[in-house]
Image (cartoon, coloured by chain):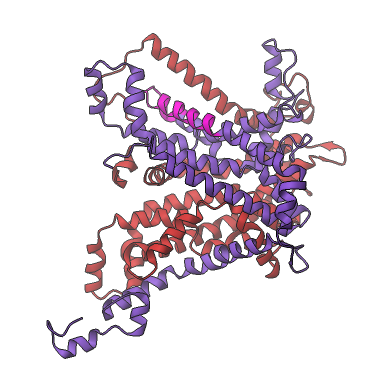
Amino acid sequence: MTVADGSIEQTINNRPTLLARVVGTKTQYQMSRALWGYLFALPWILGLIVFWGGPILASLYYSFTEYGVTGSPTFTGLANFTRAFTSDDLFWSSLGRTFTFAIVFVPVAISGALVLAILLNQKLKGTNIYRTIFFVPHLLPAVAIAVVWSFLLAPKLGPVNDFLRNIGIDNPPAWLSSRDSALWSVIMINVWAAMGGNTMLIFLAGLQGVPRELYEASEIDGASGWTKFRHVTLPLISPTIFFNVVLGIITSLKVFTTAFVTTQGGPSYATWFFALHIYNEAFKYFRLGYGSALAWVLAIILIIFTFIQISYSRRWVHYEGG
Amino acid sequence: MTIQTSAETPYTVQQHKGGRKPRLTRNRLLLYAVVLLLCTLFGFPLFWTLMSSFKTPAEMFAFPPPLFPDVPQWENYVRAVTMDRVQTVRWFANSAFVVSLATLGTVISASLVAYSFARFEYRGRDTLFFITLATMMLPAQVTLIPQFVLFFKLGWINTLKPLWVPFWFGGGGFAIFLMRQFFLSLPKELDEAALIDGANYFRIFWSILLPLCKPILATLAIITVIATWGDFLGPLIYLNSPAKFTISIGLHFFNGAPEVGGEPMQHLLMAVCILSMLPVIIIFFLGQRFFVQGIVMSGIKG
């Protein structure tokens, strides 16, 4: 804003007002645009304050208090965290169970989705129908899926065990009703619902986006089917795989509905996941302070995981054009 | 990858592209066998539920379980919607109410906010956008308890308000992100031309840009409908009287006690299950082109 290139008048007109300096603009026109920008973003700014920022701060505060919903929070320092780490029998076991779920669910669901996508990319007749059949489970309400599977897996009257007995397995597992198999059954139901979902579609688009020239060039070099997959397809879709692994871990650390509806966390805590633990503490026993502390433990684990994945991903994720 | 190319690739699998028609070799027969086996695995649970919803109570408890009903009991569906204790129609109406308002709120407010992010420059915009992305990573459990306290203090417990009002405040990080990416792909010259013609910014948004956003708005609407229809944790926490239930929590309630006065109702539970799935399946088939394209777009660009 110098006098050199214009008249005094112009300079005075263009001098930024206090408001303009606050919103970071120079001219009248820019300022009016900035104000319109704030106006249009207003619903979300309010939403962030009321439904995100405020609650995050509140839950951080609650996590250091004892709070039943009708009273007011009493500050108890680190008591909630001490209790979680040392005297809550279900804390470590539910955390461990949730990790077992993630460690099995994420690789199985993601490699399963990749296999389905590769099958759909083989130009088989009727591909559109297969894709729809694979995809539909993903759309269904989680409660309906849980109810349906609890009937399918019924130890005596369920069709799954009926089939197993027919092919000569005399003592099929009791699935959701036994503490040995309940966790695996819940994982299986979730894999069934997730495998043909968004992940598969994203992989399919990724596969179809691999340029044909790359395959043709590698064929000329004499590459086999596996070599082509390993050295052409896999590097090119690695960003997609990475994205889905991050999302998959976040989803599995929050696993709730299937277990809640089919087993209520049982039998004898075999499917008592961390999210169930939070739910029961906070909304069944109304220990909102302790529930908040548990939620923060989960959040911090998630944040650490995400950071590890993002920094580690540079080693194996291949981004086209840098 | 631009929106245009990603929009057409995923859903139209071109058969025999490139002229070379694949021959039916033994390997390809094997592929067909694998695909059909997988289709059975993915399709059987739904098929079985549909068949069970037409069974008599005796058939539900027969051993070994029969696959098909002897005589399809069509009146199961009549009973499923007219039972006293299980208020299926009421639950459907509540779900429809919540889903419509939540979807409308998401579509309107997310596109306004995205317009602001994509077209205006102001201090804090990029920070705000970064926070928007970060909210997608945070587990819902962290905000759940204080939100419950907030709605409790507002007297909204056991009302449907907590399930739709928040959607009118931007519709969430994913919705804003999806819409912003689309606005960025529209040429800025459109806005400038309209501005010279004397249109104000709201008019540019409403009459020029929004009509061009129809496909992405359809995508966002379908994704929101499917997510809110199936939502379980929200209704579980906020609703406690059966008259207020949405279909998800209602189904859970019915599943918890499927025998009324000693009369087994499992066959009717199967019918309610099928009914609860119908709306999302219908919406998916009507709008699958938009739906698939939206998922792929957000996934690849994410």
Q: Position of residue A149 (x, y in %)?
A: 67, 32
Left or right: A85 as drawn, with respect to A220: right
Residue at left 49%, top 46%?
A306
Residue at left 65%, top 64%?
A61
Q: Do we see residue B238 in this rendering?
A: yes
In the rendered view, tell whether residue A128 sits above or below residue B191. above
Residue at left 68%, top 59%?
A63
In the rendered view, tell whether residue A77 sits above or below residue B19. below
Question: Which residue is nearer to you in this view: A45 or B271?
Answer: A45
Chain identifier, colour purple: A
Question: Which residue is nearer to you in this view: B187 or B64?
Answer: B187
Figure colour of chain B: red
Main SS category, magenta section: helix
**Which of the 4 image quadrants contains residue B185?**
bottom left
Q: Is residue A124 magenta?
A: yes
**In the rendered structure, which segment of residues is drawn in magenta?**
A106-130
Q: Is residue A27 magenta?
A: no
Q: Position of residue A138 (x, y in %)?
A: 54, 38
**Which of the 4 image quadrants contains residue B16?**
top left
Question: Which residue is nearer to you in this view: A18 or B234?
Answer: A18
Q: Residue furthest left?
A: A5
